[in-house]
Image (cartoon, rainbow, N blue to C red):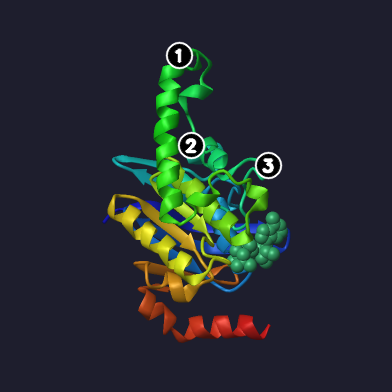
């Protein structure tokens, strides 16, 4: 399968800290790719580079969408999002005073109701709003969170906020999802449900790049894994190859002993 996303030799520094050094990774179209590494290894920085939150010091990011290849490093986050690449955050960025359903309905871009001329005709946006509400209800149901639809986000547990953050990403019309630790703090059954849904969406044509510390869960669902360590690519391969790679084990042990 051709690559939909390519990170080529990206370097990103913060003052004296080299967060990423000459990192290259590829995500195949309709792939489910994992990105792991000990704390501080550069995973979030890489997500920030791909999603337009950081401009790399060196290197390029390419998005091959259908027959169209374009360089996306240097675009701002809204521009990257508009191209169909969405990222979720390690710490959920939800509107805490709004309900779960309100948060989900606010997410997708380009809704007809947002356009002043189209908003004049309520029928157009009411129909769209109904379709979005249906999608939100379906997703909440899938995660067993339907009972929270009308609960304010500020009243949710951290684990539920985490799941709502992921569902919010899935509400968008994006084709490529960058999920930052979607299973952090989420109990095992819900974490497996989440990854099963990822595989189901993937079977319907969606691509995923996922950062996750819950390696034991994620490894059962990804096709390929990249391992970062101290800002550099340490290893890559199929999940079973990567988990038995001595360098990877040592990097994690080093982190645990730190
Ligand atoms: N905005 C920033 N300013 C200064 N240093 C930063 C910034 N963002 C990241 N860093 C540094 O870059 C390195 C990589 O951090 P990054 O957050 O990308 O790692 P990570 O693998 O996502 O870690 P974790 O698993 O703990 O989330 C770390 O040393 C971190 O302190």
- Tell me the element at label 3: loop
Image point 38% across, 45% down: which residue? 175
The disc, 3 or 2, on the residue closer to the chain's N-terminal end is: 3
- Tell me the element at label 1: loop
Image point 47% across, 36% down: which residue? 82
Mark 3 C-beta closer than 8 Å to ligand 1: no
- Tell me the element at label 2: loop
Can see residue 92?
yes
Mark 1 C-beta closer than 8 Å to ligand 1: no
Tell which tag, 2 or 1, sits nearer the viewer: 1
| In this picture, residue 138 sits left or right of residue 229 | left
Where residue 150 sits, quadrant-wise, is top right
Distance from disc 3 to disc 2, alpha carbons, whole Å, reads 19 Å
Tags 2 and 1 in contact by the CB under 8 Å rule?
A: no
Tags 3 and 2 in contact by the CB under 8 Å rule?
A: no
Q: Position of residue 204 (x, y in %)?
A: 29, 50
Q: Position of residue 239 (x, y in %)?
A: 38, 75
Q: Callout 2 environment at 10 Å: few (<14), some (14 to 19), or many (20+)?
A: some
Outermost residue toward the right?
15
- The residue beneath circle 2 is 108
Distance from disc 1 to disc 3, alpha carbons, whole Å, reads 29 Å
- The residue beneath circle 1 is 121
| Residue 211: mark in rendering | none
| Quadrant for the C terminus in the image | bottom right
| Quadrant for the N terminus in the image | bottom left
Image point 38% across, 58% down: which residue? 198
Tell which tag, 3 or 2, sits nearer the viewer: 3
| In this picture, residue 14 sits left or right of residue 61 | right
- The residue beneath circle 3 is 97
Q: Position of residue 97 (x, y in %)?
A: 68, 42
Q: Foreground: 180 or 49?
A: 180
Q: Report ligand 1 position as a quadrant.
A: bottom right
């Amino acid at each position: 399968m051709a690559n939909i996303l390519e990170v080529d030799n990206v370097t990103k520094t913060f003052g004296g800290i080299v967060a990423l050094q000459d990192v290259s990774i590829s995500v195949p179209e309709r792939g489910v790719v994992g990105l792991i590494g000990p704390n501080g290894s550069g995973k979030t920085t890489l997500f920030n580079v791909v999603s337009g939150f950081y401009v790399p010091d060196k290197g390029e990011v390419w998005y091959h969408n259908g027959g169209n290849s374009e360089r996306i490093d240097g675009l701002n986050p809204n521009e990257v999002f508009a191209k169909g690449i969405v990222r979720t955050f390690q710490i959920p960025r939800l509107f805490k005073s709004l309900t779960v359903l309100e948060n989900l309905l606010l997410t997708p871009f380009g809704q007809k109701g947002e356009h002043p001329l189209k908003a004049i005709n309520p029928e157009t946006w009411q129909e769209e709003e109904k379709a979005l509400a249906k999608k939100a209800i379906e997703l909440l149901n899938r995660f067993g969170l339907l009972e929270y639809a009308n609960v304010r986000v500020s009243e949710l547990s951290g684990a539920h906020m985490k799941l709502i953050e992921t569902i919010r990403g899935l509400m968008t019309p994006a084709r490529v999802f960058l999920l930052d630790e979607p299973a952090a703090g989420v109990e095992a059954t819900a974490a497996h449900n989440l990854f099963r849904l990822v595989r189901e969406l993937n079977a319907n044509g969606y691509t995923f790049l996922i950062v996750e510390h819950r390696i034991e869960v994620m490894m059962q669902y990804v096709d390929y894994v990249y391992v970062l360590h101290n800002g550099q690519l340490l290893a890559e391969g199929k999940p079973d190859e990567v988990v038995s790679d001595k360098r990877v084990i040592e990097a994690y042990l080093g982190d645990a002993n730190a």
